[in-house]
Amino acid sequence: MPRGALAVSGPWPAELVLVRHGESVGNVADAAAQKAHADRLTLDYRDADTPLSEAGERQADAVGEHLAARGSDTPDVIVTSPYERAAQTAARAVRGWGHRQEVIADERLRERDLGLFDGMTGSGIRAEYADEAKRRAWVGKFYYRPPSGESWCDVALRVRSLLVDLRAGYADQRVWLFTHQAVIMAFRYVLENLTEQELLEIDRTRDLPNCSITTYKGTAHGLELVSFADPAVVSDSAAPQTTEPSRSSEGSSEGSDGDR
């Protein structure tokens, strides 16, 4: 399979930091539904409005403490997904940092849209949409698009669009993005020119804890990965650590692909 990438010239941000949002009430509801082998989550919010849990608020505050301790090595620009759990994480982090830093909302950082499968577990999808479950197994997780939803490729297109704007407007600056699990994985796919198989292997074998930090540094040739899903900001604080388990098989729940 071809591995080359399109040649792109011009400057990059000096640093790109991706922060996964803190634990949300949706994460809690998803874990409860999986444990109970339920078909659907018990959740009274639409995906965009799902707020942080109490633990998630403490995790976001830990990011603020981390920013306050970084001295001058702090963001020049902060951009967040407009979804409530990410926006809350960014707002609490900035407040804890103690700076009057503007936070920009950009819908391209929103979580992957699961369409008709939103709020469902894998067992629920297989029970109510057996034909779609079979189609997903055939097409594969990366290319499969749920009814009325997005594939991982669709998320990657959003990431490519955002990177064009970041390079044009924020070259040589430190950029922090507050976003979601699937979006962070899409950044890895785009920036590191990964194959479908390489990306899915990372997804199967690596956890992405809440408020973990993924860091890229700018080089003459692009953005180079420094660390992925680093949990130290939370683990070094008094905040509880939470994560969703890595996907041990391709037959894992489609319902768990959403980062609520």
Image (cartoon, rainbow, N blue to C red):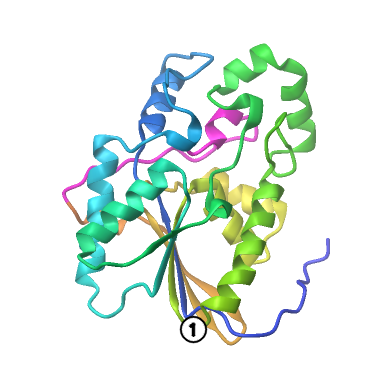
Q: Nearer the viewer, residue 162 or 67?
A: 162
Which residue matches tag 1? 172
Would you say 130 lies left or right of 253 here? right
Residue 64: say if magenta.
Answer: no
Q: Residue at x 21, y 59 (%)?
A: 96
Q: Position of residue 9 (x, y in %)?
A: 69, 84
Would you say 19 lies left or right of 148 here? left
Q: Point out the image quarter for the N terminus.
A: bottom right
Q: Residue at x 62, y 25 (%)?
A: 117
| Residue 188 higher or lower than 255, as above or below | below
Say few, some or many: other residues with alpha carbon within 10 Å of mark 1 (under 14 / 14 to 19 / 20 or more): some
Q: Position of residue 123 (x, y in %)?
A: 58, 17
Magenta-highlighted residues: 238-260
User: To which quarter of the image does residue 19 belong?
Assistant: bottom left
Q: Nearer the viewer, residue 42 or 198?
A: 42
Q: Position of residue 99 (x, y in %)?
A: 24, 68
Residue 248: say if magenta.
Answer: yes
